[in-house]
Each structure stands twice: as C-alpha cells, then as structure tokens.
Amino acid sequence: MTHDDERRTAFVDLELAAVWQGRERGVVTDDEIYQRLDELERLLWRRVFGRLRRVAPGSRAYVGFPASPAGGPA
C-alpha cells in the first residue's frame, strides 16, 4: 500500500466516523447516513477498478493478489 493509498483509506475511515458520530448526536438522519455510505462505497469501488486498469493485460492478478496461492496450482 502506498502513502497515497493510506491517506485515501484514512479519509474513508474519518468520513465513516464522522457520519456515525453525527447520527449519535442526532444531527444526521438515517437517510443521510445511507446516502453517504453509498457514496463512499462507489468511491472505494472506483479505486479498486482504477488499480485493476493499471495491471498489465494478461497478467495473473486479482485486486493486488496472485491468482493462485503460493504453492497452489498456477
């Protein structure tokens, strides 16, 4: 994981904490929570697919992991 990836992951963690904190305080509705969770999920999926695009065509990788476990069939 690169420094940028760690920073982006920290952003998502902070956003999640802020949303739930807002709910506990009664300043964020359930609808707002679910809307923000949907936005964060889309953001995370865009990052996953962005990483996949950087993988060379024909390479044996899936979301950063080898296609078969070490010692398993190739």
Image: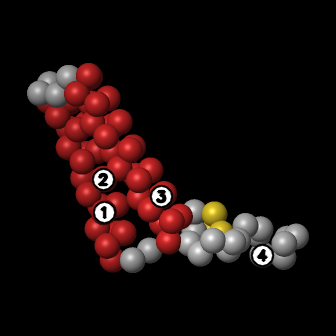
Depth-wise, is mark 1 or mark 3 nearer the camera?
A: 3
Q: Would you say 55 lies left or right of 61 here?
A: left
Q: Tell me whether circle 4 and circle 2 mark residues in contact (CB < 8 Å).
A: no
Q: Looking at the picture, which amino acid does disc 1 mark?
A: Arg
The answer to whether residue 69 is above or below residue 22 is below
Q: Would you say 37 lies left or right of 52 here?
A: left
How many angstroms separate mark 1 from mark 3 (CA)? 12 Å
Q: Tell me whether circle 2 and circle 1 mark residues in contact (CB < 8 Å).
A: yes
Q: Mark 1 sits on what residue?
A: 8
Which is more N-terminal, label 3 or label 1? 1
Residue 66 can be seen in this image: no
Q: Mark 4 sits on what residue?
A: 70
Q: Looking at the picture, which amino acid does disc 3 mark?
A: Val
Nearest the eye: 52 or 58: 58
Residue 31 can be seen in this image: yes
Q: Position of residue 63 (x, y in %)?
A: 57, 63
The disc at residue 48 is: 3
How many angstroms separate mark 4 from mark 2 (CA)? 31 Å
How many angstroms separate mark 2 from mark 3 (CA)? 14 Å
* Mark 1 residue element: helix
Number of marks present in the image shown: 4
Query: Within the image, what quadrant is residue 47 found in?
Result: bottom left
Q: Would you say 1 lies left or right of 16 here?
A: right
The answer to whether residue 17 is above or below residue 58 is above
Q: Looking at the picture, which amino acid does disc 4 mark?
A: Ala
Q: Would you say 12 lies left or right of 64 here?
A: left
Q: Position of residue 60 (x, y in %)?
A: 70, 71
Q: Where is residue 64 in the image (x, y as percent from the top left)?
A: 57, 69
Which is more N-terminal, label 3 or label 2? 2
Dot 4: few (<14), some (14–19), or many (≥20) neighbours within 10 Å?
A: few
* Mark 2 residue element: helix
* Mark 4 residue element: loop
